[in-house]
Image (cartoon, rainbow, N blue to C red):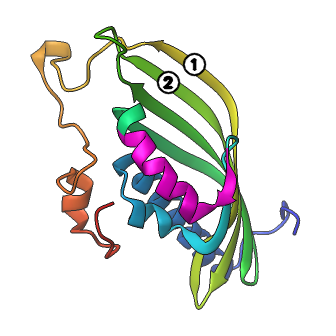
Amino acid sequence: MALDLEHTPTPEAGLAMLAIHNVLARQAMGNDTLDAALWKSAFWEDATEDHGWADMNAHAFIDETVPMLRTAMEATWHQVGLPLITVEGDTARSVACFLAHCRVPAADGGTPRDLVSGGRYVDRLERRGGVWRIARRVSKGDWVRIDPASHIWGTPTLGGHIGKMGTRDPHDPARVLFERVYAVGAG
């Protein structure tokens, strides 16, 4: 399945690409809110995830990663975009760029650290029963930077304003807005 550089996608392929964008968004939001059910909804039950330190069943990876993230990072934020997607029948391939910002707690009362990284998600997706999900993912980091945090989240910024912060619980503004539109439980 080669990337088609000559033709505009058919309407059917365009709809598949839109569904795949939604899969990528569910994965990122599930990761950032630690909602295991939402995160898993982006992957087939037999999907695999190669995240560098682990190459295993994607659902098992999520089950292991959620508790680790609860203690290892105060918050994470993933931006996924610029996907190149090819669709051929019930299979698709996608390469999407990601930018991740992770707040690492302070050790022994020191300054928290910000881990910022960029890379690519290399995905093979399958449509089963009309539903698109990831069947195989390779997460490829391209760069990483770790610095002392320059701002403590949830404290005043310019002009003394405190912005509304996203959370990892059911009260996150996005969850409230959509009223859990994906019909999954909190992870």
**Residue appearing at x 30%, y 72% in the figure:** 181
Q: Give percent across and percent down for residue 131.
A: 56, 82
Residue 145: assigned label: 1
Q: Is residue 137 visible?
A: yes
Q: Secondary structure at mark 1?
A: strand
Packing grade of label 1 (10 A; few <14, some 14-19, many >=20) is few
Q: Residue at x 23, y 51 (%)?
A: 169
Q: Are marks 1 and 2 in contact (CB under 8 Å)?
A: yes
Q: Main secondary structure of the magenta part?
A: helix
Q: Does 184 sit above or below residue 146? A: below
Where in the figure is residue 3, as x and y percent of width and height? 84, 61
Residue 82 as seen in the image, left or right of residue 179: right
**What is the quadrant of residue 159 in the picture?**
top left
Question: In which quadrant is the N terminus drawn?
Answer: bottom right
Q: What range of the chain is rendered magenta?
A: 54-70
**Residue located at (28% from left, 47% from top):** 168
List x then y, in percent, for residue 178: 25, 66
Does the magenta run of residues contain 62? Answer: yes
Amino acid carrying label 2: it is Leu
**Residue tagged 2:** 115
Work out which residue is located at the far bottom of the displayed protein and give it.
129
Q: Does any portion of residue 49 appear in the rendered image?
A: no
In the rendered structure, which disc, 1 or 2, sits on the residue that comes first in sequence? 2
